[in-house]
Image: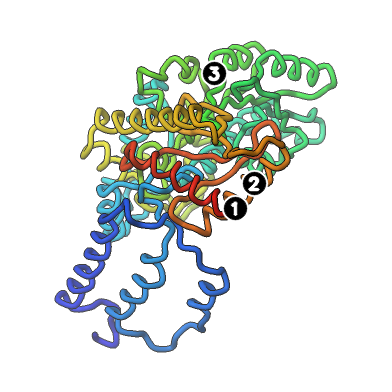
Amino acid sequence: MNSKDLDLPKKEFKELLDISTEMILQKFEHFEERKAFHSFPQTEIENWFDEKPPSEGMSQVELLEEVKHKILDTATDNIGVHMYGYVMAGGTQISIIAEKLAATINQNIGKWHLAPSIVEIEKRVVQWSSEIIDFGKDIGGVLVSGGSEANLAGLTVARNIFFEKKNIQQKGLFGLKPFTVYASTEVHGCIDKSVTQLGIGTNNLRKIAVNSDFTIDIEILEQTIKEDIEKGFEPFCVIGTAGTVNTGAIDDLNSISALAQKYGLWFHVDGAYGGLACVLPSVKKYYMGLKKADSVAIDFHKWLYQTFEVGCVLVKNWDTLRNAYFKKADYLDSNLEDQNRLNFNEHTFQLSRNAKALKVWMSIKGYGMNKLKKMIQKDIDLAGYLSDQVNEAPDFELQARSALAVSCFRYVGNLSDESEIESFNKKLVAALEKDGRVFLTGTKLNGIFVLRACVINHRKQKKDIDYLLRIIRDVAKTLH
């Protein structure tokens, strides 16, 4: 290598690409045989990387060997068939290829003339996203890191629209009544973070009780809005969830929309988990009212099976999004803005942005929506199969059945005392992680600790569900 140059000669670069490609290919072999989690002590992994920045570089072939040994071989197997924790979709081969190509051209998607083709692709992905969820044609949107940022962006627009109505730029905040946001007790934790960042405050986030199916109680929601108005608060935004992270519950979006119209509230939908499932005839009835939202958050690294990270926020028109973020900067001006170019830096917080849209565009083009819809339906069917198996088994207890792809349950064995069952299941989650053959997490429903299995992975089959239950039983036996 030339001492003045960081680039390798083509032959050596190709060798590295070939080695890395083989490493990738190996990850797509023997899914069933791999552990979901490798239980190393945290201090051991920390020690692997406990070194000062090297003054001299090492052989890049040896570096790849180190990466394989310390990272790829020990990574939590999110792409595999035994991962049930959180919402891990597994990624697709097309998205891997797209990530490599996007890194190669190294585009900054902040302004049109920095990345003309990718900007146009992102515009198209935004439009496709709106069409897929039947949100409308004349809409605005931008790709973001995921559901958390998409929800923050939607609420940012909501707050700024509210501020415009109140003429905050001239009057300031001092004469403003406390303004309030409404969501269910099952709302994602990013909403708490968002209202904190936006200066609204968690004290002004009203968390509304849920029904037995974990959807927001519409009567209590309206009652709370009325009470706040009587107390001198100013309601300005209501959030409906299209797929709660705990159980996959879908709020009554139609009724929430009606309340939003009645009381003049911004209606935001968190569809990060379940929004894209609205394309399925089997669950479409749950999404009536989604198209009436003012803004929607969706997540492509969930049910479009993309590699981390990519999500999307949609709003009813571009202007509201631009008004929330646009700040003029002389060095960003160009002489060709009259060509109707879209500059994404004016529609989101970031200026420097990577080409998130490429993998989404390539996946939709490469697989087609029909195939993707079949995979989403398969996930839902497998979650239903898991719930059925649990419900029929004497040693398990079903706690929540979902219209989407989550099942919440407990292992009860021969236990009958509630405190013993709770204690046992907490120990069981930790023991399953240590065992590593499957990975799932726990959560609380109505104050009860339960096991939560999320089935979002296009590679899973019924035999993998059977394997999950078998391993839970095996590990449970070791705790008795």
Q: What's the distance in space between the residues labelled 1 and 2, CA to CA? A: 8 Å
For the point 38% across and 18% down, the residue is 282
Q: Which residue is mark 1?
A: 479
- SS for tag 3? helix
- The answer to whether residue 323 shows anywhere in this view is yes
Count residues near mark 2 (Cα–Cα under 10 Å), then give few for <14, some for 14-19, many for 20+: many
Image coordinates for residue 228, horizontal then vertical, percent: 79, 21
Q: Which residue is mark 2?
A: 424
How far apart marks 3 and 2 lie (CA) works out to 37 Å
Dot 3 corresponds to which residue? 253
Do labels 1 and 2 touch, CB within 8 Å? yes
Between 234 and 449, which is closer to the camera in this rendering? 449
Q: Position of residue 41 (x, y in %)?
A: 55, 69
Q: Earlier in the sequence, mark 3 or mark 1?
A: 3
Q: Residue furthest left?
A: 11
Q: Is residue 20 above or below residue 56?
A: above
Amino acid type of the residue that numbered disc 2 sits on in the rendered structure: Phe
